[in-house]
Image (tube, rainbow, N blue to C red):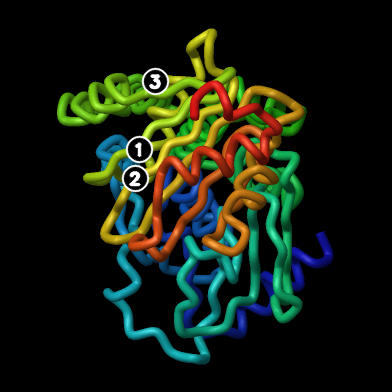
C-alpha cells in the first residue's frame, strides 16, 4: 500500500497523466484502464486512457460505448516529455506496447515480463488470470467504493482473459469474481460474453478449419491473407476444445508482420516459454503458461513449415511423420 500511495501522491503533482493499454487493447486492458481511471479520480487525479494501434473487436466497442469509457488513440493528444504514463496489461519494452512520448512511471501487468529499472512503480502478478483482478485489489486495499459500471467492466475483463474462469485462474481471481458478480450489470456482462464474434468472422473459422494441421496433439494454422490478433486468440481457444489438440499455434500475415497466437492446456508445454524459444533470433513473444502471443517482423524470410518445425522441436515432438 505504501508504494501504491507513493504513486498516487506522485501523480497528484503531475499536470497530465495517461493510462496506456497495449497496442491492440482487449476487454481486460480497457477494463483495467477504466477502473484505474475512476480510482485515481477519487484522489483528484485526472487521467486520459490511450492506446497505439487499433481496437479490433466489436464486442469491445460495445463495452466501451455501453459503459461510456473515454478511450482515444494516442494521436488525439499532443504528448509531452513531462507527461506521466501508466501502462496497464502490458509492459514498457514489449513489442505490443509502443514507447510513447512521456515518462513511464508505473507498469501494472499480469504477464511474465521483464521490467526496465527506470520505472518507479511496478506491479507484476503473472499468477493472476487477468489484469482486472489487480486493479480490483487496489479498490479493496484502499477501501474505495466501486460503482456498477466499473464492476461491470472488471467482470467482463476477468471473464474474457480467463475464458470464463477456465484458464490461468488464481484464488484472487475467484475472490474478485465473487465480489464483482454482486455489483456488476449482469445483463450487460452476459451480452458481451455471449456475443463476441460476428458473421463476418466465420470466414476465418472456415479458412482455419479447412487448413488445420494436427501433429501429435499440436495444431497449426496460417492465415496468409491476414487475421486480426484478437480473433486469432478466439479461434485458438476454439481449436483447443478439440480432443485431438493440446497445443495450438496460429499465425497471420498482417501488414508484412507475422502475428502469432498460442494456446496450451498442458502443464509441461508452457506457452510463454515455448514461443520465446521458437522466436529467439527471429521475433519476440511472451505471455502466460496457457496463452501467449508473438510477432515476426521480417515477413520476407517467413516460412510456415519452418515455423512448424521450430515449434515441434521446442515441444520435443517428433516431426518426421509429418515431413
Which callout, 2 or 3, points to the residue nearer the camera? 2
Q: Is residue 42 visible?
A: no
* Alpha-carbon span between mark 3 and mark 1: 31 Å
Tag shown at residue 252: 2
Instruction: Give the class, few, some or many, for how many residues have Cα within 10 Å of label 3's Cα (few <14, many ≥20).
Output: few
* Image x and y of residue 138, in percent: 69, 50
What residue is at 35 percent from the left and 37 percent from the top? 222
Q: Tag 2, which secondary structure?
A: strand
Label 1–label 2 contact, CB within 8 A: yes
Q: Nearer the viewer, residue 77 or 224?
A: 224
Instruction: Give the class, few, some or many, for how many residues have Cα within 10 Å of label 1's Cα (few <14, many ≥20).
Output: many
| Rendered-image quadrant of the N terminus | bottom right
Label 2–label 3 contact, CB within 8 A: no
Decide which of tag 2 and tag 3 comes sooner along the chain.
3
Q: Tag 1, which secondary structure?
A: strand
Decide which of tag 3 and tag 1 comes sooner along the chain.
3
Image check: 187 left or right of 164? left
The residue under label 3 is 190
Image check: 231 left or right of 322? left
Q: Nearer the viewer, residue 137 or 275?
A: 275
What residue is at 54 percent from the left and 8 percent from the top? 243
* Alpha-carbon span between mark 1 and mark 2: 6 Å
Which residue lies most toward the left here? 200
* Image x and y of residue 54, in percent: 30, 57
Amino acid at each position: 500500500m505504501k508504494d501504491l500511495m507513493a504513486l498516487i501522491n506522485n501523480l497528484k503533482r503531475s499536470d497530465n497523466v495517461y493510462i496506456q493499454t497495449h497496442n491492440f487493447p482487449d476487454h481486460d486492458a480497457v477494463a483495467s484502464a477504466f477502473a484505474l481511471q475512476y480510482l485515481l479520480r477519487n484522489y483528484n487525479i485526472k487521467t486520459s486512457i490511450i492506446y497505439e494501434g487499433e481496437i479490433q473487436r466489436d464486442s469491445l466497442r460495445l463495452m466501451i460505448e455501453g459503459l461510456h469509457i473515454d478511450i482515444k488513440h494516442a494521436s488525439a493528444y499532443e504528448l509531452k516529455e513531462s507527461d506521466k504514463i501508466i501502462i496497464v496489461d502490458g509492459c514498457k519494452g514489449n513489442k505490443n506496447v509502443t514507447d510513447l512520448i512521456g515518462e513511464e512511471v508505473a507498469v501494472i501487468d499480469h504477464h511474465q515480463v521483464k521490467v526496465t529499472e527506470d520505472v518507479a512503480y511496478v506491479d507484476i502478478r503473472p499468477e493472476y488470470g487477468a489484469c482486472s483482478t489487480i486493479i480490483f485489489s487496489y479498490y479493496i486495499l484502499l477501501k474505495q467504493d466501486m460503482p456498477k459500471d466499473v464492476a461491470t467492466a472488471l467482470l467482463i475483463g476477468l471473464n474474457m482473459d480467463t475464458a470464463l474462469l477456465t484458464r490461468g485462474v488464481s484464488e484472487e481471481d475467484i475472490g474478485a469474481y465473487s465480489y464483482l458478480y454482486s455489483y456488476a450489470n449482469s445483463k450487460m456482462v452476459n451480452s458481451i460474453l455471449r456475443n463476441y464474434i460476428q458473421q463476418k468472422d466465420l470466414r476465418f473459422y472456415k479458412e482455419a478449419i479447412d487448413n488445420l494441421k494436427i501433429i501429435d496433439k499440436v495444431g497449426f494454422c496460417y492465415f496468409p491473407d491476414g487475421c486480426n490478433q484478437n480473433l486469432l486468440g478466439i479461434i485458438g481457444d476454439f481449436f483447443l476444445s478439440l480432443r485431438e489438440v493440446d497445443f495450438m499455434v496460429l499465425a497471420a500475415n498482417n501488414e508484412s508482420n507475422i502475428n502469432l497466437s498460442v494456446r496450451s492446456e498442458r502443464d509441461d508445454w508452457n506457452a510463454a516459454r515455448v514461443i520465446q524459444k521458437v522466436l529467439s533470433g527471429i521475433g519476440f513473444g511472451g505471455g502466460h503458461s496457457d496463452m501467449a502471443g508473438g510477432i515476426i517482423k521480417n515477413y520476407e524470410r517467413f516460412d510456415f513449415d519452418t515455423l512448424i518445425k521450430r515449434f515441434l522441436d521446442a515441444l520435443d515432438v517428433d516431426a518426421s511423420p509429418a515431413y
